[in-house]
Image (tube, grey):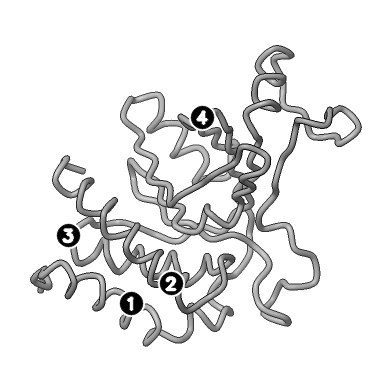
């Protein structure tokens, strides 16, 4: 993407998430991703698709410990009192649309990823403050990592400026059973509100 589209997408997704949180719960990842994809279409950004996944967020203290040990730490008995992690998309019993949708949904393009509802993993008391994530694969190595992640070959690791680490893992889970995906009026209304507030002309 060019810098202008990146800037607009970042601005629009932040505004969209604010609107979503005024109406829905923080774990509204399906609606948030549907809105992201529609905003990309309006900006002329092609090839953006939804992807079902889980994500684990590690706080700065745990990130530093993992760097020192050279490996990921997943067992709670290895944590000290300052170290913490949050998992999103691991909810048992909510799959297949029986009680909602239990995974986590993000939007992926050929050289970027958008996790609009990452803020649901925020734990300020643990040094974990998240906002909508727009991760750019700026190098050939990053683009290959993103491609491998999309294909389900590897976890995608994202290091954030706030000292936290994210680990995304692709899962096979049908997001189209979610009411937030089925009801298109929800996303259309939010996208319209975002674009109207920015005096943006709809692309054909």
Q: Quadrant of the C terminus?
A: bottom left
> Which residue shows up at 29% across the image and 51% down it?
10
Ranked by sequence position, the earlier of labels 4 and 2 is: 2
Side of 61 where 183 appears, left or right: left
Side of 194 where 34 appears, left or right: right
Percent of width and height locating residue 118 = 52, 53
Q: CA distance from mark 4 to mark 1?
A: 30 Å
Q: CA distance from mark 2 to mark 1?
A: 7 Å
In this rendering, which labeled residue sits more in front, label 4 or label 3? 4
In this rendering, which labeled residue sits more in front, label 4 or label 2? 2
Name the one closer to the observer, 37 or 76.
76
Question: Do the residues under discs 2 and 1 have CB atoms within 8 angstroms?
Answer: yes
Percent of width and height locating residue 40 = 26, 61
Question: Do the residues under discs 4 and 2 have CB atoms within 8 angstroms?
Answer: no
Above or below 180: residue 66: above
Instruction: Identify the residue under disc 1.
Output: 190
Instruction: Identify the residue under disc 4.
Output: 159
Question: Do the residues under discs 2 and 3 have CB atoms within 8 angstroms?
Answer: no
Q: CA distance from mark 2 to mark 3?
A: 23 Å
For residue 20, the mark is: 2
Instruction: Identify the residue under disc 3.
Output: 44
Q: Quadrant of the N terminus?
A: top left
> Which residue shows up at 33% across the image and 41% down it?
111
User: Of helix, strand and loop, which one carries label 2?
Assistant: helix
Side of 85 where 172 appears, left or right: left
């Amino acid at each position: 993407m060019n810098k202008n589209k990146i800037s607009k997408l970042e601005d629009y997704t932040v505004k969209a998430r604010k609107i979503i949180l005024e109406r829905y719960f923080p774990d509204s990842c399906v609606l948030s991703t549907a809105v992201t994809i529609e905003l990309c279409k309006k900006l002329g950004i092609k090839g953006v698709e939804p992807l079902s996944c889980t994500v684990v967020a590690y706080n700065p203290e745990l990130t530093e410990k993992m760097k020192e040990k050279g490996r990921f730490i997943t067992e709670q008995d290895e944590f000290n009192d300052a170290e913490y992690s949050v998992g999103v998309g691991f909810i048992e019993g909510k799959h297949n649309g029986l009680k909602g949708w239990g995974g986590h949904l993000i939007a992926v393009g050929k050289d970027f990823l958008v996790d609009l509802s990452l803020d649901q993993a925020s734990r300020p008391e643990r040094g974990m403050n998240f906002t909508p994530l727009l991760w750019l694969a700026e190098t050939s190595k990053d683009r290959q990592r993103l491609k491998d992640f999309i294909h389900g070959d590897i976890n995608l690791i994202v290091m954030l400026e706030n000292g936290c680490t994210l680990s995304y893992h692709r899962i096979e889970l049908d997001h189209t059973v979610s009411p937030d995906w089925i009801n298109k009026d929800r996303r259309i209304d939010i996208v319209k509100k975002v674009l109207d507030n920015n005096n943006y002309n709809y692309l054909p």
